[in-house]
Amino acid sequence: MRRSVTATLLIFGSPQLAAQDVLLRMHPPNGQTTHYEIVVETFIGGTPVTQIQKDTTAAFMRMAVWQSSTVTAVLGDEFRVTQVVDSVRIGSPATRGQATAIPEVAELMRGTTTKMRMTTRGKVISMEVNPGPHVKSVAAKAKGIPDPGQTRATLGPLTSFCLLPADPVRPGATWRDSITQAIDSVRTPGAQMTFVSSFTLDRMIGNIAVIGINGTLSTTGPTFTPTTFNVIGRAYLDLKAGHAAKATVEMKGSTATPMGEMHTKVRTLMTTK
């Protein structure tokens, strides 16, 4: 049962207790546009990549994505968002930028549009991805490559590692949640991804709820080697604006390959601009 701060005051008659109870929700207003910068650094170790890395301490790949996110509808406990990739920059610090295809990949990503339905508790209900104009142009010019069209997914990707509790919580409180989804967006029949995590409301800084994340992300499927990543992160939820103002996530895992074990660490930083 949801309780507002006012309801808590009426029931308990304690301003101090009421100030501790917080209903955590994403509730951006219709028409709101937010600009994000998302930086993803991928570190890879192990036999399969050792020979091509000139600096094993640097990120094997670093990608910075600038994205605009616009709320197109608010329907009760759900809202709809359209995200557009404005620009992308990709580099390979570990190989000193010698991956020649990187600029072309960045150009192909520009203009990609994603339409999502989400709940105010952070779960993706549905997603639709439309490739950017450069992908369609390449497909049109190349023989034998079909128009990529739209990609649909039952639940969409794990765009948020922050799943919010059903009831109000106070700083120090913990809760658990999970989400399982098909990975049909990359054309892998039968593959799925599961995210299970515990969350903690670390503290409140004004209107900002600081939420700790500690969980696992696993992938399975007939064409997949089962992989599990440990996920640790922190989300800064702006309760006044109704969206995440900042998020940091680090994933660590390893995968068996014919050449030996490959270790992967992915660091992601998302900030509003």
Image (cartoon, rainbow, N blue to C red):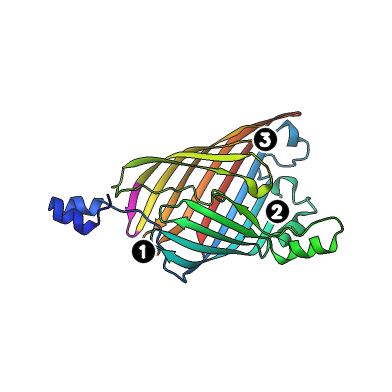
- Position above or below: 124 against 107: above
Of badges 1 and 3, nearer the viewer stands 3
* Horizontal arrangement in the rendering, residue 226 relative to residue 78 (left or right): right
- Position above or below: 148 against 187: below
Residue numbers of the magenta segment: 202-207
N-term mark: 1 or 3: 3
Label 1–label 3 contact, CB within 8 A? no
Determine if the magenta segment contains residue 116.
no
* Horizontal arrangement in the rendering, residue 208 relative to residue 85 (left or right): left
Amino acid, disc 2? Gly
Task: Report the residue marked by disc 2.
Answer: 91
Amino acid, disc 3? Phe
Task: Report the residue marked by disc 3.
Answer: 224
Distance of mark 1 from mark 2, alpha carbons? Answer: 36 Å
Label 1–label 2 contact, CB within 8 A? no
Distance of mark 1 from mark 3, alpha carbons? Answer: 41 Å
- Position above or below: 200 against 263: below
Label 3–label 2 contact, CB within 8 A? no
Query: Given the current orientation, which residue lies at the most extreme bottom position?
Result: 31
Helix, strand or loop under label 1? loop
Residue 240 — which label?
Answer: 1
Give coordinates of residue 212: x percent, y percent.
41, 44
Give coordinates of residue 165: x percent, y percent.
36, 47
> What residue lies at 34% left-to-right and 48% top-to-bottom?
166
Helix, strand or loop under label 2? strand
Q: Main secondary structure of the magenta part?
A: strand
